[in-house]
Image (spheres, grey):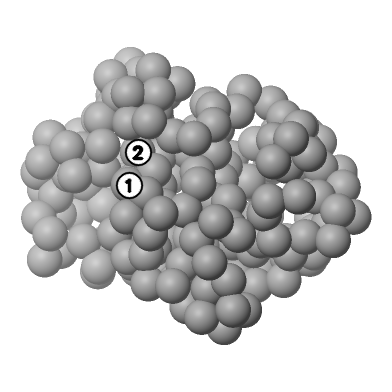
Amino acid sequence: MKYKYILFDFDGTIADTEDVNFDIFQQLASKYKLRQVEKEELPFLKKMSASQIMKDLNVKAYRLPLMLRQGKKILKENIVNIKFCQEDTVEVLKEIKKQDLKIGIITTNSRQNVNKFLNINDAEIFDVVYSASMFGKESKFKKIMKKNNLTPRDILYVGDEIRDIDSAHKCNIDVASVSWGYNDRESLLENNPNYIVDEFSELLEIIRLT
């Protein structure tokens, strides 16, 4: 078996936060005078990278950290209403762990929100949970590799966005892109993930074949 550590994004990969985060953005857009977004625009936005979306919605980079902190705080109040993206998520994760693999989360969300979600859903099975900046997942990959004496070939990252692909590739880490998250299948494929996943259970086959 090739991999030793399977790392996951949270929003849009594990947890279905899309509707809640849409409502949160509308609140922040009003406060910071950003371009308001209609639900009908989401398919178009799903084709764009995070940087492109920021430009399209007039999100200034210097305001992003504050907006993210405020967004996470609002999300914490609504985390009880969040569900898994796919119903068999916990079952698949437990099966992955049976393969003598470690699993972790690297997310732009807060550790508090992730741990609260996992606790509510009886899914406290991850070995580590790391919170990263919007474009800072590479440092967390390197931290895990150093702490566990791993090489890039030992890790598979599972995410739903173009920026997840970019971060993994910068560290020479394989990435499996899920097609149900914040970027659509076509835009993910254009950015060359190692694998594309349409059902969470397909990860088991990827792991077994490597």
- Residue at 14% across / 49% down in the picture? 59
User: Residue 188: horizontal and vertical position, in percent?
Assistant: 39, 28
Q: What element carries label 1?
A: helix
Measured Cα–Cα span from mark 1 to mark 2? 6 Å
**In the displayed structure, does residue 123 sit left or right of residue 193?**
right
Q: Which residue is denoted by mark 1 in the rendering?
A: 166
Marking on residue 190: none
User: Residue 28: horizontal and vertical position, in percent?
Assistant: 26, 52
Q: Is mark 2 on a helix, strand or loop?
A: helix
Three-letter code for the amino acid on which mark 1 is drawn: Asp
Vertical relation: 45 (above or below) 29: above
Locate the C terminus by quadrant.
top right
Nearest the viewer among 186 and 156 is 156
Quarter of the figure with residue 74? bottom left
Nearest the viewer among 116 and 183 is 183
Q: Which residue is denoted by mark 2 in the rendering?
A: 162
Whether tag 1 and tag 2 are in contact, CB under 8 A, the answer is: yes
Residue 9 in sight = no
**In the displayed structure, does residue 51 sit left or right of residue 145?**
left
